[in-house]
Image (cartoon, helix red, strand yellow):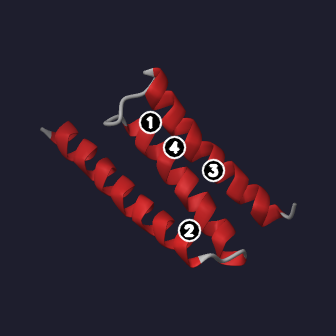
Amino acid sequence: MDIFQFIGFLGMLCVVGAYFLLQLGRVDANSMRFQVINLIGAVLLIVSLCVHFNLGSFLIEVFWIGITLYGIYKILRERKR
C-alpha cells in the first residue's frame, strides 16, 4: 500500500465513520461535526484519486464535497440568525 492508498483509506474511514456515528445517534446530520468529518473524508479521497484516478469515484467525491460545503453554509447561516 502506497501513501496515497493509505490517504484514501483514511478518507473512506472518515466518510463511513461519519455515517456510522449518524446511525448510532452520536451526531446529527445538521451538525458541524458531521459535515466536517464528511468534508475531510472526501478531500482525502480526492487526494488519493489524483494519483489512482477513477472518473466515477472522482465525480462522486466532487459532488460529496459540494453537498457538504452547502451543508456547512446552511449551518453557518443559521448560526448568524
Name the quarter where the N terminus is drawn: bottom right
Residue underneath mark 2: 57
- What residue is drawn where x is 29% and y is 56%? 70
Q: How far apart are the alpha carbons under marks 4 and 2?
A: 18 Å
Which quadrant of the figure has residue 3?
A: bottom right
Q: Does residue 40 appear left or right of residue 52 in this picture?
A: left
Q: Does residue 8 appear left or right of residue 70 in this picture?
A: right
Mark in the foreground, 1 or 2: 2
Q: How many numbered markers are drawn?
A: 4
Pointer 1 with pointer 4, Cβ within 8 A: yes
Q: Which mark is residue 25?
A: none
Name the quarter where the C terminus is drawn: top left
Q: Position of residue 34 (x, y in %)?
A: 44, 38
Q: How far apart are the alpha carbons under marks 1 and 4?
A: 6 Å
Q: How far apart are the alpha carbons under marks 1 and 3?
A: 16 Å
Q: Three-letter amino acid code at disc 4?
A: Ile
Q: Which mark is residue 12?
A: 3
Mark in the foreground, 1 or 3: 3
For marks 3 and 4, the one nearer the N-term is: 3
The crowd level at tag 2 (other Cα within 10 Å; few <14, some 14-19, many 20+) is few
Q: How far apart are the alpha carbons under marks 3 and 4?
A: 11 Å
Q: Position of residue 48 (x, y in %)?
A: 68, 67
